[in-house]
Amino acid sequence: MSATCNEVLDRIAAGLPLLQAPWAEPLAESRFPQAAVLVALTAEEIPRVILGRRARHLRQHPGEIAFAGGKRELFDESTWATALREAQEEVGLPVELPVALGELEPMITRTGFQVYSCVARVPAEPDLIVDHAEFDSVFLPPLSAFADARRFRLEEMTYGSKTRMVPHYQLGDDSVWGVTAAILALVANVAYDAGLELQRNWQVEP
């Protein structure tokens, strides 16, 4: 855990592909509803990650911990365009501010969304403006916290007739779980060689 900021972010950049490619198919032809999130990491000695507590009034996933991000819109040319637009709308990050580091393979959630993760570097003290229609608040825990196996667990959860192993982290009073936890585990594996096992192929429909 003693790696410097440059070492951590350089390791992520070296360990992840960065294509910044257009969406693979027209929106109307995609098999799943599509979304993109921005995994924004601060450029400092101990990089932090921007997370938000979803507003309690939202119909989907109220109160859950999430990245800035959202649904693909017809005018979005790429996954990065979606992630950057949503981050500007939700937490006030100017679209030109994040510096792209890499991308994760798309992940399919239990709700049937195909989520694309765009990993980027942002300044150490970003000037965030929270859209309270989306997030009650934002917080920036250290990325290294998600490499700590003592905080990480897999829970067996049943949805309808299917049982799945779902990743969870506990950070104080905050429970980070589901696709957000899976993304953080994958990034921590690249950044810190954390060796966290998800026990599920997130590229296929659960």
Image: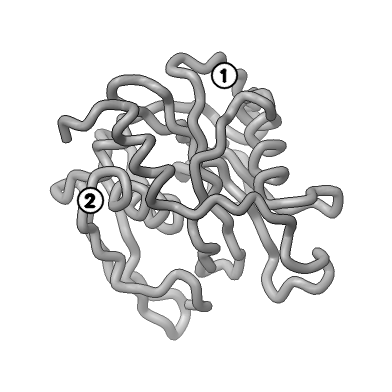
Residue 43 is left or right of residue 35, and the answer is: left
Residue placed most toward the observer, 70 or 186: 186
Residue at left offset 45%, top offset 57%: 179
Count residues near mark 2 (Cα–Cα under 10 Å), then give few for <14, some for 14-19, many for 20+. few
Residue 203 is left or right of residue 44, and the answer is: right
**Cα separation between marks 2 and 1:** 30 Å
Q: Position of residue 174 (x, y in %)?
A: 33, 38
Which quadrant holds residue 49?
A: top left
Residue 52 showing in the rendered view: no
In the picture as drawn, the residue positioned furthest to the bottom comes out as 161
SS at mark 1 in the image: loop
Residue 126 showing in the rendered view: yes
SS at mark 2 in the image: loop
Q: Indicate the quadrant containing the N terminus: top left, top right, bottom left or bottom right.
A: top left
Q: Which residue is mark 2?
A: 193
The three-letter code of the residue at mark 1 reads: Leu
Residue at left offset 48%, top offset 27%: 138
Residue at left offset 30%, top offset 54%: 168
For residue 128, which numbered disc appears in the image? 1
Q: Position of residue 147 (x, y in %)?
A: 23, 45
Which quadrant holds residue 115?
A: bottom right
Label 2 or label 1, whichever lies nearer to me, is 2
The three-letter code of the residue at mark 2 reads: Asp
Residue placed most toward the observer, 122 or 199: 122
Residue at left offset 51%, top offset 25%: 122
Which quadrant holds residue 172?
A: top left
Q: Position of residue 91 (x, y in %)?
A: 60, 27
N-terminal of the pair, mark 2 or mark 1, is 1
